[in-house]
Image: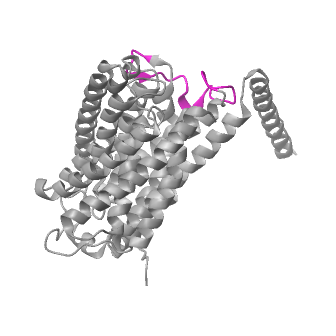
Amino acid sequence: MKRAKQCTIWLLLMVALGSLSISTVWAQEGTSAIDTGDTAWILVSSALVLCMTLPGLALFYGGLVRSKNVLGTIMHTAIILCVISIVWVLWGYTLAFGPDVGGVIGGLDHLGLMGVGVEAFPGTGIPHLVFMVFQLMFAAITVALITGSFAERMKFTALLAFAVLWSTFIYSPLAHWVWGGGWMAQMGFLDFAGGAVVHISSGFGALICAILVGQRKGLGTEAMPPHNLPMTVLGTGLLWFGWFGFNAGSALGANGVAASAFVATHIAACAGGLSWMIAEWINQGKPTILGVASGMISGLATITPGAGFLGPLSALFVGLVAGVVCYVAVIWKTRLGYDDSLDVVGIHGVGGFTGILATGLFASIGAQGLFFGNAGQFGIQAGLAIVTMIFSVVGTYIILKIVDVTIGLRVTADDENVGLDLSQHNERAYS
């Protein structure tokens, strides 16, 4: 009898709390200027960016490694999506988009998503929760991109620690500086969808990862071709598909800017694939599907910061430049001696940096670059791109050293020989 009374009391409390939550939501919904069209588009865009990460990036990276490491590589992307989503909900979002504190970081007002409901996010017609989840997808894929630089050789436990620390101390501050009202935004820095926040930060963070984790065992003496190029091409298509949400969704509404970003994204990807193919054809004698796929991603990464600011012809030029510049950067990695397994530095780091500079030259929609009458914009773009690169390099170095001292970064030689699939996860992709 006593237990029944206790259960009844708990049930009543739960009903009361549920009623309070529902009434709060209804109150917010009743007083918010929500645009249903904009909300629908950003919800779809959030799903598109999720598709970029899983399965897009997972398949793109998974096909590029050797068969003994394919599941371990896919696992990196999958678990990062899970871990960073939780980090974002608990503290990442408030550090990035909480009330500005000195231009450096967001306040803790939204810790655990406090105060983040269905009311309109300031300056938009979408619910605050929708804005939050859209930005969550960016936070997840940025960390996942870095894993390509140390594919086939990092401890799984080290990966988990690195992901949490990097998202907290590198990604969230950068997102606040550029998109959350921080000091870069106050200086007029243009980064429409993540050239600096996503691509420069992950690309140059990947450079430090490749250097500190070290080269794969047997690099230069053993053949290490991609084990499944059709898988990589499928991943490329899914990345491209999702990138429409990544770039056009960053307009935060179903409007003309979204349409412009959508078109610029497609044109740049096509131009990047074409120019990489031509550069490779001239240099190596034959065009390859891996080259075309890499060029497409290069065009997409490079147009990202200017997608909403550039017209179609500017996007075409940027894509053509991206394919060549990123191809050269990938070729040079062997000469410089670092083992960036899946070309994160050359495609995302160099591509993002190039895109930020191109935005300072060609911006003509909603802002003006050098070629459209604003000479100072190029200087702002160049200076703050360098700051982003330095911040990512130094921060990543410190985080890796902490992880190395406490956990250790790299699997043993025996585990590396066996492959990550068996040594880290006790499973095989193929029997």
For the C terminus, the image quarter is: bottom left
Query: Left or right: 107 with respect to 394?
Result: right
Residue found farthest to the top:
102
Q: Residue at x 26, y 70 (%)?
A: 416
- Kindly report the secondary structure that dominates the magenta region of the rendered protein: loop
* Residue pictured at 48% horizontal, 24% vertical: 366
The answer to whether residue 254 is above or below residue 421 is: above
Residue 108 belongs to the span the image colors magenta: yes
Q: Residue furthest right?
A: 1
Q: Quadrant of residue 205?
A: top left
The part of the image, by quadrant, that contains residue 283 is bottom left
- Up/down of 375 relative to 6, above or below: above
* 76, above or below 205, in the image: below
- Identify the magenta region: 101-124
The quarter of the picture where residue 287 lies is bottom left
* Image vertical order of residue 219 relative to residue 10, above or below: below
